[in-house]
Image: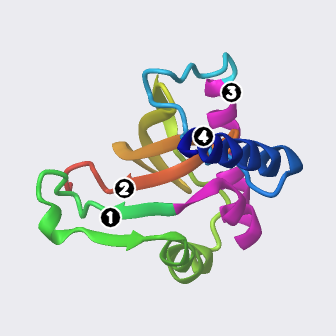
Amino acid sequence: MKLGRSLNLCIALASLILAGCLTPPPSLPPSPADFTPTPDAAQAIAELIATHRAAVVADDVQGLLDIWAEDGVIRDANHTPDDPTDDHVWRGLDAVLSYYTTILFPLYLNEVGPVDTALTIKGPEAVMTGTTKIGDELSPRGEQWTFAFRDGKWKITGMTFNLEPRR
């Protein structure tokens, strides 16, 4: 009797899955060990930075929404990269957008960095360091960006600036 009931239950579940009433659980994202970045990952990240530049210059909130991750973080290291206690942090997409609309957009920038960049890609994550360029001002090794490959595309997950020592 038990075998017949189990068999009927298995048949019923299979029928529901086939009928589309039940869906199997979503697959987990690939682990970093299973992920192989596409050959154009560096190009995609370079395009993110170019889009970022254009969005900042144009005060384009939608352009920023398209390239930042929901859990993105902006950090002002306050020229003391080894002391996080004096950092100013904007965490989450709403806070990131607030940073742009209240701090960067009012500067009416016509040029913004990074320049002289170095990119390291490890699985679905990447880190880029560079010189901060805002207008004519250059701050060597002044910023670090982080990226993640999510939902089929690269997103900015973080930007830390003012990493260079105070002059």
Residue at image position (65%, 73%) is 108
Q: Which mark is residue 27?
A: 4
Q: Residue at x 60, y 40 (%)?
A: 27
Judge the density around disc 2: few (<14), some (14-19), many (≥20) Cα neighbours within 10 Å.
Answer: many
Q: Which residue is mark 3?
A: 43
Q: For this rendering, which residue is in front, 76 or 164?
A: 76
- Checking the image for residue 161, the label placed there is 2
Say what secondary structure mark 3 lies in: helix
Residue appearing at x 16%, y 62% in the figure:
84
7 or 103: nearer the viewer: 7
Name the amino acid, label 2.
Phe
Residue 149 is situated, as x and y percent measured from the top left of the image, at 58, 39
Q: Is residue 11 left or right of residue 98?
A: right
Quadrant housing residue 140? top left
- Asked if labels 4 and 1 touch by Cβ distance under 8 angstroms, the answer is no
Q: Which residues are magenta?
A: 41-70
- Using the numbered discs, state the Cα–Cα distance from disc 1 to disc 2 in whole angstroms: 5 Å
Q: Residues within 10 Å of mark 3 (few under 14, many from 20)?
A: few
* Rendered view: 119 above or below 82: above
N-terminal-most mark, 1 or 3: 3
Q: Of the residues tagged 3 and 4, which is closer to the observer?
A: 4
